[in-house]
Amino acid sequence: MVDNGNSAQNILVHDNFLTDDEYKGIYDLFTGSTIPWFFNGSVTYGNGPLESQFHDFQFTHTMYASTRVQSPMFEKLTPILDKLSIKALVRIKANLIPYAKTIIEHDMHIDFPYEAKTAIFYVNTNNGYTKFETGEKVQSIGNRAVIFPMQTKHCGTTCTNSKIRVVININYF
């Protein structure tokens, strides 16, 4: 487990990132029935083993991309965005990965090929995780954020102890 910036790759983990009330608002929104989720037939566009290919999909909700707000849900992210030192946004996207019978790691990737930061906010607690190329893992714990250089290779996973794994991915300068 990466812990509070002790990694050589500047991976910073922040537990209890939001206040309880702020977190409850984000949790209720992204695990509730009012947010529209959109099917993506691939998580990272890789070609892993056949079993992982069947789980190589996710549902997403993009809130910011192409230099503009894409969703009214963007406003709900103010508590998260206020805690990050953002000069400019690149993209904000929520990912919903359904339950699987086993933990399946998706392909390693970088979000964009330039120097900036990635923040992943974990909406719900489950046994999924974010894994880095070094082998370090950050467990999916609700109200946790991990921040790292955007060119750091990483991957997400499925989960086996919850119906869904939900994270919010923020790319920014």
Image (tube, helix red, strand yellow):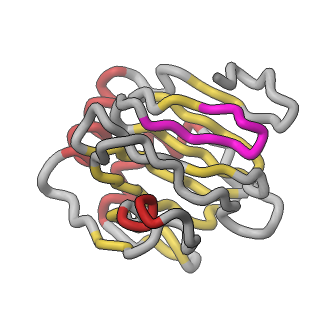
Along the horizontal axis of the image, is 56 left or right of 134? left
Residue ID at (34%, 34%) = 124
* Number of numbered discs: 0
Decide which of 17, 125 is in the foreground and name it: 125
Decide which of 85, 112 is in the foreground and name it: 112
Along the horizontal axis of the image, is 171 left or right of 135? left
Quadrant in which the N terminus is drawn: top right
Report whether residue 60 is seen.
no
Residue most extreme to the bottom = 66
Residue 87 in magenta stretch: no
Along the horizontal axis of the image, is 162 left or right of 84? left
Quadrant in which the C terminus is drawn: bottom right
Kindly indicate the quadrant of the structure image that contains residue 31.
Answer: top left
Kindly indicate the quadrant of the structure image that contains residue 22.
Answer: top left
Q: Pinpoint residue 24: horizontal percent, then vertical percent.
A: 27, 30
Residue 134 in magenta stretch: yes
Decide which of 66, 123 is in the foreground and name it: 123
Along the horizontal axis of the image, is 32 left or right of 18? left
Q: Pinpoint residue 151: horizontal percent, then vertical percent.
A: 78, 57
Residue most extreme to the front = 50
Report whether residue 51 is seen.
yes
Residue ID at (43%, 27%) = 141
Decide which of 45, 38 is in the foreground and name it: 45
Residue ID at (43%, 41%) = 103
Q: Which residues are magenta?
A: 128-137
Q: Pinpoint residue 116: horizontal percent, then vertical percent.
A: 77, 57
Residue most extreme to the right = 8
Q: Pinpoint residue 9: horizontal percent, then vertical percent.
A: 83, 38
Residue ID at (34%, 54%) = 96
